[in-house]
Image (cartoon, rainbow, N blue to C red):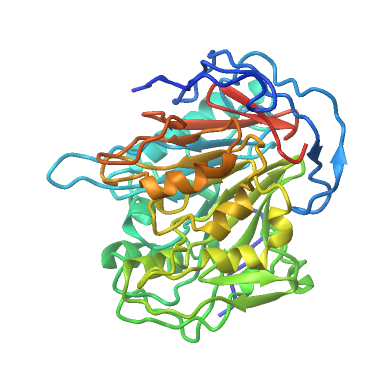
Amino acid sequence: MSPVRFATAALLLAACPALPPGADGGSGGGLVMIGGGSGGGLAQPGDAGAGDDGGADAGADAGTIGKGPFDAGTNAPAGPSPGEVTYWQLELPPGVLPFPRSGEAAALVGPDGTLVLIDVGNSNHDDEVRAAVRELNTQWLTPARGYARPRAPLEVDWVILTHFHADHIGAFAPLTSGAEPLSITKGVIHRGFVDVGPATNASDFQDVCTALRGPLAAKNVGLCTASPESACSISVRAPASGCPGLLLGDLSRADDDAALEPTFLALGGGARLELLGAGAFARQGRAVVAGPSFGVTDTNEENGRSVVGLVSHGAFRLLFAGDLSGSGAAGEPDVESFIVASHATHFGGVGVDVAHANHHARKTSSNTAWVTAAAPSDGRARNVIAGINTAYVNSPHQETLDAWLMGDRLGGGRFVVTRRAPAAGTSPLLIDADGRVTLQTVERGDGYWLGARAFASVRR
């Protein structure tokens, strides 16, 4: 079956350790990281130095250019602004003992107000996700603030479900049904109802599958295919035969499908979210190639099929990959290395500005190939974000912190988590936001604010 197509129809201040002058290419520190999306919090903008322009290619380096000192202004933006990209890593509470709930979700806003949810958390997280969507649509993405049109309070353009674990899809059913359902205007993107195994939660998978084959069928965008696909049951594996959904061009249009261009979501203002991989497949030129072969019986085998995406806006790059695995240990297939090898030009010589740490910063992910590609040891300022609550005991793992922080990979940047879990690793560069982590580009991607600290984009 081909992918379905359609026409476009408690704030905690955690002090950063002081940096020597120039540690992030500019100013020193004593700064704070602020969650919750609030403004205020003065920060010194980093000096850009020599960098690489993003150019027309979505990821290739375009040479060194001189653009003068980077000036982000003196205050972190209070919320999304027209012409810029905003990313909120949402704080999702763990619930009440003895049944704490893990969960992760993020909201991405494009320069024109396009709103994308990346995962939706567990079944008890619909209230938090719904509240974030309502806040964005009613307080920020309004004509009064410069956006083109008013949006319905619960309007969402796209939903991306990176994989079928309960902590990423459990809230989908309550969010799309009942008295206050989300209004999804464009589509729900997932890896396809293929290679389903017992590691997924049977009821959550059935809820998502049934909805996308029933009342939300017009919004169903499955990237990978099988013949036949799973019958909404984890007892039917349905081995994938391919992943043609990675070569559909602009997902809002059907007239460019035959061109075999990379699949992307247009976010306005030249920004885009390009899909690099899904279901352990990756695009290589105008072909889709299968990655390492593995089974369906282990939890991390589901993680290994996560959707991988790259957000680009001017010189700025943000990388996310759900729970993608990379350790290569038993039951933890190394898909990270396969994605990196398939997309060397997207990482280029300077990597990305912000990386979402795969699998809640657990040691099953963030292997050497992945971290080296995303954050070369060149001293440039980069940042890592992880979606964690206290149910993810040990997150971030010390091994993951060490992988990202060794060799000056983050320069003057930080490793920022929504909440540090019990028995987690430690580092002076680990920032526990204890709330929402907010990121927003400035000057059309020339740089960005993360919390209350400004950074120049590494390709600038």
Residue 204 vs 257, above or below: the answer is: above
**Position of the N terminus by quadrant:** bottom right
Splitting the image into 4 quarters, where does residue 235 fall? bottom left
Residue 307 vs 448, above or below: the answer is: below
Q: Position of residue 118 (x, y in %)?
A: 50, 49
Residue 157 vs 253, above or below: the answer is: above
Camera-side residue: 164 or 460?
460
- Specify whether 13 is left or right of 140: left
Count of numbered circles on the image? 0
**Position of the C terminus by quadrant:** top right
- Specify whether 29 is left or right of 329: right
Residue 435 vs 120, above or below: the answer is: above
Q: Position of residue 422 (x, y in %)?
A: 25, 39
At horizontal 78% and vertical 54% (from top left) the residue drawn is 60
Q: Taking the image as drawn, is residue 17 in sight?
A: yes
Q: Position of residue 227 (x, y in %)?
A: 50, 86
Q: Taking the image as drawn, is residue 209 in sight?
A: no
Splitting the image into 4 quarters, where does residue 370 fall? bottom right
At horizontal 69% and vertical 67% (from top left) the residue drawn is 248
At horizontal 33% and vertical 66% (from top left) the residue drawn is 299
- Specify whether 121 is left or right of 456: left
